[in-house]
Amino acid sequence: MVKKIKGGAGKRKIIDKLRNFKQDVLTIPNLLTSIRIILVPVVLLFIWLNTPVMRLWSWIFYTVATVTDFFDGYLARKSGTVSVSGKLLDPLADKFIVNLTLVLLVSMQEISAWPVIIILAREFYIFGIRSLAMEHDLVIAADIWGKTKTMLQMFALPFFMINQKTLLALVNIDWDPSGVGYFLIWSSIVFSLISAFTYTREVKRKIFG
């Protein structure tokens, strides 16, 4: 009889966990975030193929991905479905599409390595800070500085995707848009360093007082 009660309690725990998983993970905002992650290799492939038409397609899919970034946060706030998994997945998706695209562009010698090195070094540092916070059961959400940094980087990337050769081939415009891209990238670095400082200060305050 005791075994049956224990077995029933175990089943209820499993059902409760599955229900909590569905409520926390399987939401429309999180599904939109997942779509953004799935689109990352598609964007990278079209950039790597490196023809004017493929570059245009990379920009189209990249635009779709960035639009989902707006709607997942908006829907989560409006529907009251802001979740722990969403707070972790959303910045992770942003890092995938931004950082992997930057690394690919560096490998293709279409962007200087130095700003990318600074951006990646900051990301590794923040990863360490977040890991420390999680060990103390803290979830550090992105602040306004980090969100602005991400927004600037997302706006910057199309100016490298649609390069001078692509513009010349598709619309017969002889203009190098990378100058605008560099301005946005270096501006994002300023915000990224400020956000790194605010993350560090918040974690220090919550953990060490």
Image: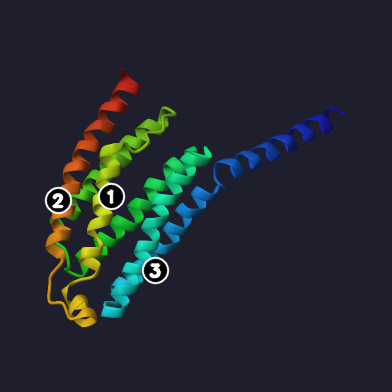
Q: Give the alpha-carbon distance from disc 1 to disc 2, as whole Å.
A: 13 Å
Instruction: Specify which label sits upstream in the sequence, 3 or 2.
Output: 3
Taking the image as shown, residue 62 lies to the left or right of residue 81, namely: left
Task: Give residue 4's position: percent from left, percent from top.
Answer: 84, 33
Tell me the quadrant of the picture where the C terminus can be found: top left
Foreground mark, 3 or 1?
Answer: 1
Question: Could you say which quadrant of the image residue 148 lies in?
Answer: top left
Instruction: Specify which label sits upstream in the sequence, 1 or 2.
Output: 1
Indicate the secondary structure of the residue bearing disc 1.
Answer: helix
Task: Give residue 2's position: percent from left, percent from top.
Answer: 83, 27
Q: Amino acid at mark 2?
A: Trp
Q: Which mark is residue 42?
A: 3
Foreground mark, 1 or 2?
Answer: 1
Q: Give the alpha-carbon distance from disc 3 to disc 1, as whole Å.
A: 21 Å
Q: Which mark is residue 151?
A: 1
> Going 33% across and 70% down the picture, which residue do you hit?
58
Taking the image as shown, residue 128 lies to the left or right of residue 109, namely: right
Q: Are marks 3 and 1 in contact (CB under 8 Å)?
A: no
Q: 127 and 34: which one is in front?
A: 34
Q: Give the alpha-carbon distance from disc 3 to disc 2, as whole Å.
A: 26 Å
